Image (tube, rainbow, N blue to C red):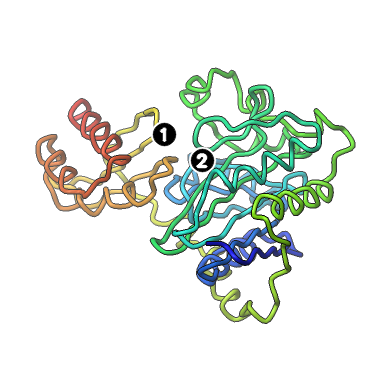
Amino acid sequence: MITNIQYIISNHTNPYQNLALEEYLLKNVGEEECILYLWQNEKTVVIGKNQNPWKECKVAELKQDGGRLVRRLSGGGAVFHDLGNLNFTFLIRKDNYDIVKQLEVILRAVNRLGIPAEKSGRNDIMVAGRKFSGNAFYSDGIHNYHHGTILVNVDMSRLSHYLNVAKEKLESKGVASVRTRVVNLQEYRPDLSIDTIKEELMNAFGEVYGRKPEPRKPILIDPKEIAKLTIKFSSWEWIYGRRLAFSDCYERRFPWGNIEIQFYVSAGVIKACTAYSDSLYTDFIEQIPTYLEGCRFTADAMVHALQKIPVEEETSRLQKDIIILLQEEN
């Protein structure tokens, strides 16, 4: 049961620091607490935990233009952040995690502004069929977070320029380009500001949880731990990982997301493997290389290996689809 709701508003726009604080809050949220964390990044592309950075965005151009690339803990697809976007994160223990309640805070805040927002699918919030908020989720088994964007006045030309959105993904959404699929809330309310959204979110947060939000006390935040996490999120290893000199690559888009599996094969054996995906089921995707490396590069051997990955009801569909992919491609 939630007995204490708190908020924290980041005072900087460095994505590595912001994600560091997000993870720190995640690990330190109390048993009966819910924290609402509001933050902004300046000229940043944020990729999902298992995505291929070179495929998802124009890395060189982003860097040349003074932008930053960062990898988050949660799954899902790549997004562009600038100061026309507000990010929110709900941090909470697993026992009190309630996606309906958390989404209600966002919907109530936006609807109160006279904008008819509604949830669509598992992780989008829309207005008239166009997305202004993409949501993603993460759990370490004890602590959970649910975070997302709120597009207020994002530079759409930069958004569409830096992101490489697969044609298959756009077709699956029934749109011609990423710009036709997303929308700024200022299109519906031209005078809308980030500060106004923050105020309405705070009001809705208190109403939905039936308590007054209190600021998170600075004494509860350890600067040394934040510094360590900032180093992690800004490191080459975390952002880019290993770039495999692969000999074979299987890729396909399914209803649950895109999967790309790269193999380095020598003497008929998989010596190295990397799996990229925008799926929200990050844990399953991360296990694929572990089970495939060392086995023979044959359909039967790879299928046998993947069948050993423990699955739940939600991830059994992924396992079956990837097995079909391996059988058809090999």
* Relative side of 255 to 97, left or right: left
Residue at position x 54%, y 63% in the image: 233
Looking at the image, tell me whether mark 1 or mark 2 is earlier in sequence order: 2
Name the residue that disc number 2 marks. 77
Q: Nearer the viewer, residue 222 or 300?
A: 222
Location of residue 228 with respect to 53 vertically, above or below: below
* Residue 163 visible here: yes
Q: CA distance from mark 1 to mark 2?
A: 9 Å
The quadrant where residue 94 appears:
bottom left
User: Mark 1 Cα within 10 Å, few/some/many (few <14, many 20+)?
Assistant: some
Within 10 Å of disc 2 (Cα), the crowding (few <14, some 14-19, many 20+) is: many
Q: Amino acid at mark 1?
A: Gly
| Residue 173 x, y percent position in the rendering | 52, 22
Q: Residue at x 71, y 39 (%)?
A: 151
Q: Nearer the viewer, residue 204 or 57?
A: 204
Amino acid type shown at disc 2: Gly
**Is the residue 35 above or below the residue 64 in the image?**
below
Which image quarter is the C terminus in?
top left
- 269 or 133: nearer the viewer: 133
Q: Nearer the viewer, residue 2 or 8?
A: 2
Task: Report whether residue 267 is seen.
Answer: no
Give coordinates of residue 184: x percent, y percent: 75, 33
- The residue tagged with tag 1: helix, strand or loop? strand
Q: What is the secondary structure assignment of the residue under circle 2?
A: loop
Q: Judge left or right: residue 307 versus residue 151.
A: left
Residue pointed to by mark 1? 257
The residue at 40%/41% (across/down) is 277
Where does residue 157 sit, x and y in percent of width and height?
73, 33
Image location (x, y in percent) of residue 286 = 33, 52
Number of marks in the image?
Answer: 2
Instruction: Tell me if label 1 and label 2 are in contact, CB under 8 Å.
Output: yes
| Image position of 175 with respect to 125: above or below | above
